[in-house]
Image (tube, grey):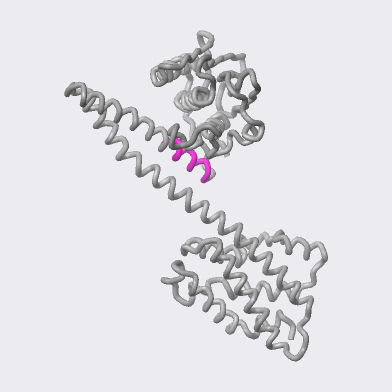
Amino acid sequence: MRLSDFILRDMADILTQWEAFAVTLLPAAASMDSLALRDHAQPLLEAMAADLSTSQTWQAQSQKSWGHAPQGADAPHTAAQTHAILRARSGFDINQLVAEYRALRASVLQLWMADCEPEVPHLKDIIRFNEAMDQAVAESVRSFSVEVERARNLFLGMLGHDMRSPLQTIQATASYLAAINAGPGVAAAADRLVRTGARMQALVDDLCDFNVTELGLGIRIMPTSIDLAAVFADETDQLRAAHPDRWIVLDAPLGLWGIWDGRRLQQVLGNLVVNAIRYGAHDTPVRVVMTGNETEVRFEVRNTGTAIEPSLLQRIFDPLQRGPETGAAQDGSLGLGLYISREIAAAHGGTIEVRSDEQETVFTVSLPRQAVARRAR
């Protein structure tokens, strides 16, 4: 009997073996009933049987073996993709998902070969079945990974949102303690609490911004008419107060007016200057140089120090990247500052670039005079 006919005829026995294996995948399967354990197994097998019965070119065979078979425009999800999404939502891990397919492959072939005896099974059917199984595994793994990533981003978004309220309460209480003049001991403790709260707030803000971009929503901006030179002068003063042992120089004209989100661009400047302080030489200044013409404004953050390695330079704006000499536990960073800065620049219709050699490292941000309020993605 050909394999496609066998799958359709003995579907019940195959599904029973599928369920018997799936129920062993603990703890995820512990609370699932028979219907949930089988979920889209039958449509998946029916699709494989239909594939075995369809003529196939050599090119199509090659594409399926790599998991690149085309998907019908009228089918938003294949059975394999839907199966993976449901398994991810039920708490299965990627190893358990792939193990299900290994078990299904073995069950179908063993049952079919036993049924074929004493005749020899059709070798072409085995090849075609393995190709169809490889395609299903590839579709499932991709969909599973996307679903897990989506769930992770939603969790991070809820975590960041829920942390903001108690953190604001801590900061407000610390500010109150600092203001009541209850003695030097209380004042010093309150000051430490205020500074620690500000660092925590910055981490939460970075986490929330990262989460928004990963969900495909982009960085939101609220452009208004501002003098960017004045906005950056204020931010530079704050950075000097936060880093009194470092020399920060602002070189800007008297006025650089445009339509931008001032708070967001202060965030970019702060990220770039702190990055320069963290990795630059301690005995030379961090320089912020602003220039502009009728259509565009540029600002550069320059520092001397060790050149950035070319391998890191290529991915420096990727999320969760940090320099080799530091870690989150040391510098209070999640490695999101440069990534978020790039997203903010993009939301303004601008760009951010970096170059680094033995003389200096320079981050350059270019912005149109009138930002287009759009999403970064």
As drawn, is 169 to the left or to the right of 180? Answer: right
Q: Is residue 302 depicted above or below 8 in this figure?
A: above
Instruction: Check the picture and name the quadrant holding the N terminus.
Output: bottom right
Residue 115 appears in the figure = yes
Identify the residue at the far top of this view: 254
Residue at 62 percent of width and 25 percent of height? 307
Q: Is residue 225 magenta?
A: no
Magenta stretch? 205-215
Residue 260 appears in the figure = no
Identify the residue at the far right of this view: 58
Residue 7 percent location from the top left of the image: 66, 81
Residue at 65 percent of width and 61 percent of height? 138
Identify the residue at the far bottom of this view: 118
Residue at 22 percent of width and 23 percent of height? 179
Identify the residue at the far left of this view: 182
Residue 167 percent location from the top left of the image: 32, 37
Residue 209 percent location from the top left of the image: 47, 38
Total marks drawn?
0
As drawn, is 286 to the left or to the right of 158? Answer: right
